Image (cartoon, helix red, strand yellow):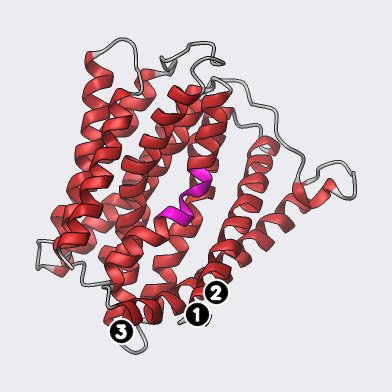
Amino acid sequence: MGTQVILLVLGLIIILLSCELFTNGIEWFGNFLNFGDGVVGSIFSAVGTCLPETIVPIIAILSSMNEYNSNSVDIGIGAILGAPFMLSTLAFFITGLSVIIFCRRRKSGIFLKINNKILLRDLKFFILIYSTGIIASFLNNSSIKRSIAIILIFSYIYYIFITVKSDSSSYQELDKLYLLKIFNKKVNLPAILVQLIIALAGIIFGSYFFVSNIEGISDSLGISAMALSLIITPIATELPEKFNSIIWIRRSKDSLALGNISGAMVFQSCIPVAIGIMFTSWKLNDIALVSCILSLVSSFIVLSWSKLNKKLNPLPFIACGISYAVFIFYLLTNK
């Protein structure tokens, strides 16, 4: 098992480094096309950092299609559901905690200055679409399930449309394109595309490493593949969102911090869930359903607090951390 753990960690490192490379490249790609920071932050950056947790279930599901492997299917579904769970609980919690830690150096102190309309829109969108995906797991008619999957895909297209339509903010200064840092040359479209291709290849390769080794580890530890993938996969693959949010909170860029998380939640409730519905039986067990319910509860807490209070403080985000603790307790008491 020692070798499998090393390879698992290696896969996670490759995924994270490739994700960072992709995010940097996709932001430059958005800048090259003259999009504002709203589109690049909520769509390009969110989708970029979502790639690892999207590729992992795709690799797992594809590996189970040639020869049925229930572990691979469970890993795929666990990774699909684990991403929105981590974002709506642990990522929100870390964001709230960061506000408390950096409150003395922040311009707004303990309060968060955000575009409340965008946050409310994202959370409402997530709750509605994610609930629809969960309901699909209780249906036996495959045609209806496929129809729901198509609806989820078009829902995200609509989300992109309304986000682009409302985008009016100026673009933020970017780090230099990583591929050209050592050459000190002017950024150009071919260099951006090459970096994106390299990053995507790294994400796929790292995801394959991850999927192929998590199965063996789950067997050795006697832990279900779904439970392991619900926790391990998202903690690692959601690191970019968490790290970015900490940096933005520290710099008092609260809208970017929360938009990166809520935008990723919308993406995760649409595209990966649609893939799961279309290419698996999409029957969620008790562990999966508990994670889904806690995701919705956490999102509803932040949504309700944002609607009822004019000033947003860390309290609702800290409460989201309780949902994560409840899930861990559930896993430990229901092995």
Q: Which residue is drawn at 36% across and 35% down?
A: 93
In the rendered view of the protein, which quadrant contains the C terminus? Answer: bottom left
Q: Which residue is drawn at 44% across and 66% down?
A: 56
Q: Which element is circle 1 on?
A: helix
The reply, left or right, for residue 8 in relation to residue 321 is right
Q: In the picture shown, does residue 47 fall above or below 284?
A: above
Give how far apart the Cα atoms at labels 1 and 3 are: 23 Å
Q: Which of marks 2 and 3 is in front?
A: 2
Q: How crowded is mark 3: few (under 14 residues within 10 Å), some or many (20 or more)?
A: few
In the rendered structure, find residue 6 and report the number of the disc placed on it.
2
Q: In the picture shown, does residue 52 fall above or below 188?
A: below
Tell which of 181 and 197 is nearer to you: 181
Task: Tell me if I can see residue 53 in this picture.
Answer: yes
Q: Quick check: marks 2 and 1 in contact, CB under 8 Å? A: yes
Upstream in sequence: badge 1 or badge 3: 1
Q: What stretch is highlighted in magenta?
A: 235-241
| Figure quadrant of residue 308 | top left
